[in-house]
Image (tube, grey):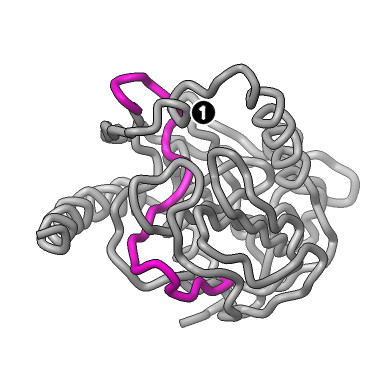
Amino acid sequence: MRTDRLSLAALALAGLFAATINAYSDPLSAIPGGVYLFPIPNGATDIRFHDKPVFTINGHALIAIPMQQTPGPAALNYKIQKETKSHSFKVRSHAYTEQHITLENEAMVTPPDEVRVRIQEESRRQRRLYIQHRPEQSVDDGFMKPLQGITTSLFGHKRFFNGKPRSPHSGLDIAADTGTPIAAAGGGTITLSDALYFNGNTIFVDHGRGLVTMYCHMSKLDVSEGATVTKGQTIGRVGSTGRATGPHLHWSVSLNGVRVDPILFMQLLNQVTKAG
């Protein structure tokens, strides 16, 4: 019965994802939580959006659009021979759906006072890792989906835990059996491998130039901080640690400190790197 319910949920989510793809198809625009693809003009350097450096690869800049970005005109800046130039594009409105989740453990909805210091420190630690901008880059061969399974929650859902509103879903949830291997979406360096309060057993892979992927709720961590991994290498196993209702992977993509839709990002990255 559980498999049947998950299959029906997967069909419904497939329809929602198709709608997202359609909303995102205009190459001259982007959506909040999406990515704008900018072909870099000859001689352009120091490309910035919101005065922050952006991710570049194979003659393209992939610009992360924050979820809180106001729809309408937007602009990025760059320099050619020390002259500052700008490029305008459009941020289109996009309606994300709601998701209501019931948790038996109320401490995962409203944590007790004794763990709040831990949660705050873990949040600061993760933010520091998200905004790193390593010069090296390890994704010239694109990304792969880290786990084959049933998608149970899309990026951007407005989430309610036990009726209480919480932050929008910052990644993609993929359900699979406990112990199923999870692969690195691309090559990079392990900058976090630890047990966190909400995210459970968690791994961060830094791919360079502000691109970081996160893998949460694992039953086992197979790599240590400081290790170098390759695309497709097993880094952990599916589990239900932290704030989870069942065994699954929460996979998120952070681009220059902004969480973006992992599937949309993967499609654009693979487009410019010609990965399969």
Left or right: residue 113 compared with residue 6: right
Q: Which residues are magenta?
A: 161-184
Q: Position of residue 273 (x, y in %)?
A: 58, 75
Quarter residue 11 falls in: bottom left
Q: Quadrant of residue 161?
A: top left
Q: 70 or 219: which is nearer to us?
A: 219
Q: Quadrant of residue 159?
A: top left
Residue 223 appears in view: yes
Determine if the magenta segment contains residue 173.
yes
Residue 72 visible: no
- Residue at the (54%, 72%) spot, across then down: 143
> What residue appears at the point 10 percent right and 61 percent down from the top-left corner?
4
SS under mark 1: loop
Image side of residue 230 versus residue 84, left or right:
left
Residue in the foreground of this view, choosing between 251 and 17: 251
Q: Amino acid at mark 1?
A: Gln
Q: Nearer the viewer, residue 67 or 242?
A: 242
The percent position of residue 78, horizontal first and vertical second, equals: 76, 45
Quadrant of the drawing holding the N terminus: bottom left
Q: Position of residue 67 (x, y in %)?
A: 49, 33
Classify 81 as above or below 178. Answer: above
Which residue in the protein does label 1 denote? 69
Q: Toward the viewer: 260 or 176?
A: 176
Query: Would residue 133 appear left or right of 156 to someone viewing this image?
Result: right
Q: Horizontal placement of 3 versus 271: left or right?
A: left
Q: Position of residue 89 (x, y in %)?
A: 51, 39
